[in-house]
Image (cartoon, grey):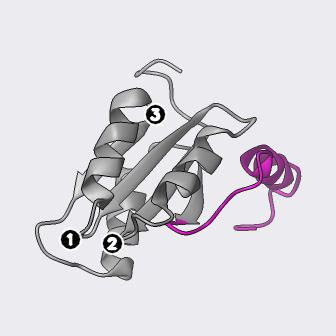
């Protein structure tokens, strides 16, 4: 996906001191069968290696965009911020300790397209 192409899905994740499980969580999104997504991640002022892990992944995949808080803001603030930054037609929520099935985004996108009367799944 080039920088100008609008992604189908915006995956949003807030992370704070998540280094024990963060890499596996990110890899589970990067391994999705659906490739038209952007991955927006906010580091909520972590004190561990979260910032380094995020920087490493961001340098490897242009779909990842990392934001950083100078002080902790909390989950509701972070999710609202990421929603405002999202460009996708749909938003998928991900926690820093979640692992997604490789077909998660593809299956959820198909479900939403086939059930336009629903607002979320």
Point out residue 20 in the picture as x, y percentages from the top left corner: 45, 66
Q: Which residue is mark 3?
A: 63
Give the residue displayed 66% in from the left and 61% down from the top.
99
Q: Is residue 89 above or below residue 2?
A: below
Of the pair 27 and 80, the residue shown nearer to us: 27
Looking at the rendered image, the disc whose residue lies closer to the viewer, 3 or 2, is 2
Label 1 or label 3, whichever comes before in sequence order: 1
The CA distance from mark 1 to mark 2 is 6 Å
Magenta stretch bounds: 95-121
- Distance in Å between CA atoms under marks 3 and 2: 22 Å
Which residue lies under the disc numbered 1?
A: 47
Q: Earlier in the sequence, mark 3 or mark 2?
A: 2
Left or right relative to 115: residue 96: left
Residue carrying label 2: 17
Q: Position of residue 91 (x, y in %)?
A: 57, 56
Q: Depth check: 50 or 93 in front?
A: 50
Q: Is residue 34 left or right of residue 69?
A: right
Q: Nearer the viewer, residue 78 or 59?
A: 59
């Amino acid at each position: 996906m080039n920088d100008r192409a609008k992604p189908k899905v915006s995956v949003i994740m807030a992370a704070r001191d998540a280094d024990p499980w963060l890499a596996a969580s990110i890899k589970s999104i990067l391994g999705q069968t659906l490739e038209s997504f952007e991955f927006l991640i906010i580091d909520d002022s972590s004190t561990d290696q979260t910032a380094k892990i995020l920087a490493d992944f961001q340098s490897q995949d242009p779909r990842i965009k990392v934001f950083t808080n100078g002080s902790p803001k909390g989950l509701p603030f972070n999710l609202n911020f990421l929603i405002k930054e999202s460009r996708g037609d749909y938003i998928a929520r991900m926690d820093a300790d979640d692992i997604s099935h490789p077909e998660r985004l593809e299956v959820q996108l198909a479900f939403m397209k086939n059930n336009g009367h629903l607002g979320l799944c």
